[in-house]
Amino acid sequence: MEGEKKMENFRDAGGHGGDLLAAASEFGIRSEEFCDFSSNVNPLGPPPGLEEELKANLHEICRYPTPQARDFRAGLAACLDFPEERILIGNGANELIHLLFLWIKPQKVLIPYPAFSEYARAARLAGAAVEGFPLPLDATLDTRSLIKSLAGVDLCIFCSPNNPTGFFYHEDLLEEVVCEAGKKGVLFFLDESFLAFTGKPAAESFSRSGYSNLWVVTSLTKLWALPGLRLGFLTGPRDGIKSLTQNGDPWRVNALAQRAGLYCLSCTNYLQQSVDLVRKEREFLLWHLQDIKELRVFPGEANFLLLRGEKAGFSSADIYRYLASRGILIRNAENYPGLDQRYFRIAVRRREDNVRLLQELQNYFSNYES
């Protein structure tokens, strides 16, 4: 009964990671004492000085925030060298996903999987039927099969780098699909929330391709480690962004989130430090995880890694409980379509945390009995 209640709490949260309070209640460890590998936000934490910036501007909570995050939107457009009229700011990428789907009201949505669960949730909330398309667990893409699957579809969703695999799909692969989708009258929705962590410049964002059927969402929550404030942006055709801007909630982004965004835009050194740290620590984890023969690691390019237990009877739920009881949270990935009880995901964190995780994984498998 107790286990069922905990599983229900997991489903209520969308099956996502980062629920420290629930973990604290379940395992009797204070939330601040957990080493959280289940949440894939920037391991550096927020930019230095941001807390002081927010404290100095707390008075802004007494008045309405700037509609449509106007100042931040202009600053972001200048930073990205991207047309401001093609950008919509939102309360995190997830809010923008739901907003766009409710506005489009697709009848049928195609989701290549494994994929972030919120795509399907947003599609169902908008009244759409959901159809899946299986992806291989590597960076290849059968574009012909995917294009064939667009028949009868209103909207195709894609994520690059993919969550949870971390694989990045190069522009030449996506371009063919987006082009053919446009010919069929199918909208293409691309999630680039983890692109920055690959080290690829913003200029490589597919949003610059100019396709009229293309929408791209990006999370700034993860890049700037702001999960408690939430910030993201959506790019798309001028007319579409204009309609969403005119008809959507003008105050969806709170004043402190806007203030944080403006501050973070100026922290260019922090962004480079973040990319350098993620690259270095991802390679460190990839190298040492190869020494654990009971695990297969998928070499993604984002700030997280997907792993699979290779021994008979392995359970991601079991290793989750083992690590959580020792103050380490991982993301049980068995609820991703296309994955099963063998899979789990870990974030890329600082060296001391990564070493701690590796030691506990080695301890777990040294005592493992299939």
Image (cartoon, helix red, strand yellow):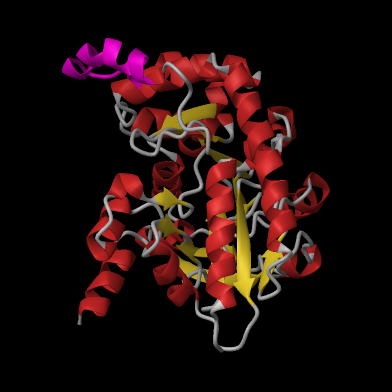
Q: Is residue 332 above or below residue 303?
A: below
Q: Residue at x 58, y 47 (%)?
A: 348
16 in magenta: no
Tell me residue 204's x, y (percent): 74, 34
Q: Residue at x 47, y 32 (%)?
A: 45
Which quadrant, please, contains the C terminus?
bottom right
Q: Is residue 344 above or below residue 49?
A: below
Residue 326: quadrant of the picture: bottom left
**Along the line of sight, the residue nearer the viewer: 311 or 151:** 311
Tell me residue 300's x, y (percent): 70, 54
Residue 141: quadrant of the picture: bottom right
Tell me residue 177's x, y (percent): 74, 55
**Along the line of sight, the residue nearer the viewer: 245 or 258:** 258
| In the displayed structure image, the side of residue 260 where residue 284 appears, left or right | right
| In the displayed structure image, the side of residue 49 where residue 362 appears, left or right | right
Q: Residue at x 50, y 33 (%)?
A: 220
Q: Is residue 252 above or below residue 55?
A: below
| In the displayed structure image, the side of residue 138 where residue 197 appears, left or right | left
Tell me residue 144's x, y (percent): 80, 66
**Main secondary structure found in the magenta portion:** helix
Q: Is residue 107 visible?
A: no
Which quadrant, please, contains the N terminus?
bottom left
**Along the line of sight, the residue nearer the viewer: 142 or 117:** 117
User: How many marks can you see?
Assistant: 0
Furthest toward the right, the residue is: 172
61 in magenta: yes
Residue bounds of the magenta highlight: 51-67
